[in-house]
Image: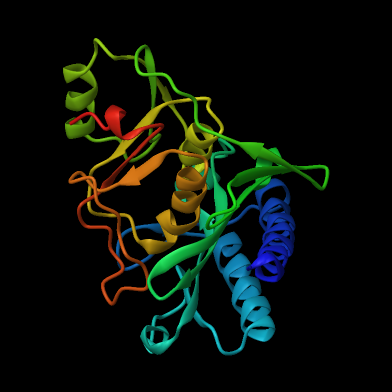
Amino acid sequence: MYHEELETAIKCARHCQKIILDVYYNENFTVETKSDNSPVTIADTKSDQYIRKTLSKAYPTYGLLTEECEDDLSRLDKEYVWIADPLDGTKDFVAKDDGFVINIALIHKHEIVLGVVCIPALDQIYWAIKGEGAYKRVNDVDIPIHVNNKKDNLLCLASVFHFTEAEGDLIKKHSDVITRVAQCGSSIKAVRIAEGEAEISYRLNPNTKEWDTAAPEIIVREAGGVYVKPDHTNYEYNRKDVYNREGYIIANCLENVLL
């Protein structure tokens, strides 16, 4: 199931990759501030417009929730809902550190069933379908990915722009197990854990929203990892309140959700 939707989402992400990189490399773009104090650029809005146009045309009966468009809540009555972040990591985009992504996920009755994460600057695509595992697409070939089984000497991936004192305190508290820390942006942290390159990442503030987490979450889970609230439960998706207010922890296994 969902392979038609998968290919639509990947083609959409690939086109948005071109839109975003054209701005990234060729334009002196301006940065505006939205009502929630987060930044937005023309790359965000152009990518959002393309995603909305493409997915609405291909699946007119599905709901749609994206970061840059007003949410009229009509999606709440839909069985299927696309949830997309047209440019996750705008601060990384503005800083030109390559740490930004495109997230596209499909939700069925509040459960993630498909996720695509594209890292435009690195030309990388990751995807997962519920029950079918997680993959990295390289030269049109889908290569299975899986978390590693490490339980000591852990590498923690921290946010470049959103790292908090509470997260730093947790890393110090478990310094006997978490021995290394590296920074990277947006959903890149999740896919690096999914492919076995790191073991844990904290995001304990309430500022992320459904479009930040839906696509990377299913990729991590299908790769054998966990993507949970601090109480070890999962978020439902297509909620009226789109904020992930309890934060989350990503890890290669539940044992490594260190709090």
At x 54% / y 55%, what residue is drawn? 131
Q: Looking at the picture, how far across and down is residue 225, in whole percent?
A: 43, 38
User: Which residue is farthest right?
Assistant: 139
* Quarter of the rendering containing residue 73: bottom left
Q: In this figure, what is the number of numbered marks?
A: 0
User: From the viewer's perspective, is 77 left or right of 3?
Assistant: left
Compare residues 35 and 76 and report the one nearer the observer.
76
Q: Is residue 33 above or below residue 196?
A: below
User: From the viewer's perspective, is 101 left or right of 203?
Assistant: right
Q: Looking at the picture, how far across and down is residue 107, in whole percent?
A: 47, 70
Q: Is residue 56 above or below residue 24?
A: below
* Quarter of the rendering containing residue 255: top left
In this figure, which colouring scheme has been used for the structure? rainbow
- Figure quadrant of the C terminus: top left
Q: Looking at the picture, how far across and down is residue 118, in whole percent?
A: 63, 50
- Figure quadrant of the N terminus: bottom right
User: From the viewer's perspective, is 77 left or right of 82?
Assistant: left
Compare residues 227 and 240 and report the one nearer the observer.
227
At x 39% / y 81%, what residue is drawn? 71
Compare residues 18 and 27 and report the one nearer the observer.
18
Compare residues 207 and 92 and report the one nearer the observer.
207
Q: Looking at the picture, how far across and down is residue 103, in whole percent?
A: 54, 57
Q: Is residue 171 above or below residue 188?
A: above
